Amino acid sequence: MSNTLSTPLVAPAVSRFRQFHALTKPRVVQLIVFCAVIGMLLAEPGMPDWRLAVPGAVGIWLVAAAAAAFNCLVEQHIDAKMARTAWRPTAKGELTNTQTLLFSGALCAAGSVILYVFVNPLTMWLTFATFVGYAIVYTVLLKPRTPQNIVIGGASGAMPPVLGWAAMRGEVGPEAMMLCLIIFLWTPPHFWALALYRADDYAKAGLPMLPVTHGNEFTRLHVLLYTLVLFASTLLPFIFGMSGYVYLAAAVVLGGGFIWHAWKLWRVYSDAFARKTFRFSLWHLSLLFGALLVDHYLLLL
């Protein structure tokens, strides 16, 4: 009898949890926290102070999740028109605007308090500024108005290493800004590769993404050009003595791979290869920062 009564109560609770969890865009937030943790680890010559690193990672995760939820709230009508995002709880009407807004606000407040109390005020303010940059400047102001939305708005997405660095050092150093620059230049070719094979979705939703406003060929050329500039930026940590030859080798191999994907995409287009290029870009950034971390600790031996 008790099992029969409890099942109807448990199932809706689990379902509602999954809905709120989906609002946080877990995969995107995982990459954000990963880059922030890399910034923390690189900021210290040895192992970081875990009394700062753990609350720092938690606080950044909460605020990033809050920004993702707010993005879902603002773009629910757009999401409903796109196959890639139509499943989101806000797009399907499974969560109300009030529920989503309160959820986003609670996450942002909790994360900000953790960063201010257990890390330092600078990290809290930088993280909050990143929230505003993504949730307001990019989502509300730029994305529906200009094809350069991902270029300008990419500045907020490039901040995680800076946040991690500030959490450990209480300041923002040039090394952190080099990492920020790499992500800033990585974002357009990464996102435009996705936009190429989702161009019909964006056109249907009325968003002025580059493939919609300037065409497929123009976008492919800019993907290639950005990968070239990105490659140059990935050499900066080695040039300025932040890393050694292990990282340099990884940067050359991964950068060459990204350029090859972009060049082939530019020469002969297919949706399948655009999707492949998008997936490679994810591996490119993750492995590049992983190599930087390995190199960092090898230099200490």
Image (cartoon, rainbow, N blue to C red):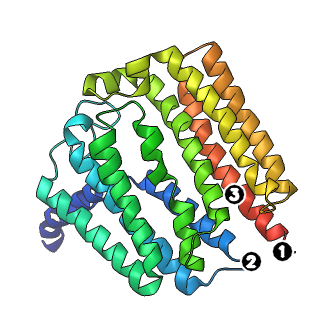
State how far apart marks 3 and 1 are (Cα): 16 Å
Q: Which type of secondary structure does the marked residue at label 3 adopt? A: helix
Q: Residue at x 47, y 79 (%)?
A: 55
Assess whether mark 2 and mark 1 are in contact (beta carbons under 8 angstroms).
Answer: yes
Q: Which type of secondary structure does the marked residue at label 2 adopt? A: loop
Q: Residue at x 41, y 60 (%)?
A: 130
The correct choice, above or below, for 286 with respect to 199 in the image is below
Residue tagged 1: 300
Q: Residue furthest top?
A: 268
Q: Earlier in the sequence, mark 2 or mark 3?
A: 2
Amino acid beneath label 3:
Gly
Amino acid beneath label 2:
Pro
**Quarter residue 64 falls in:** bottom left
The correct choice, above or below, for 292 with respect to 55 in the image is above
Q: Is residue 146 left or right of residue 36?
A: left
Q: Which mark is residue 290?
A: 3
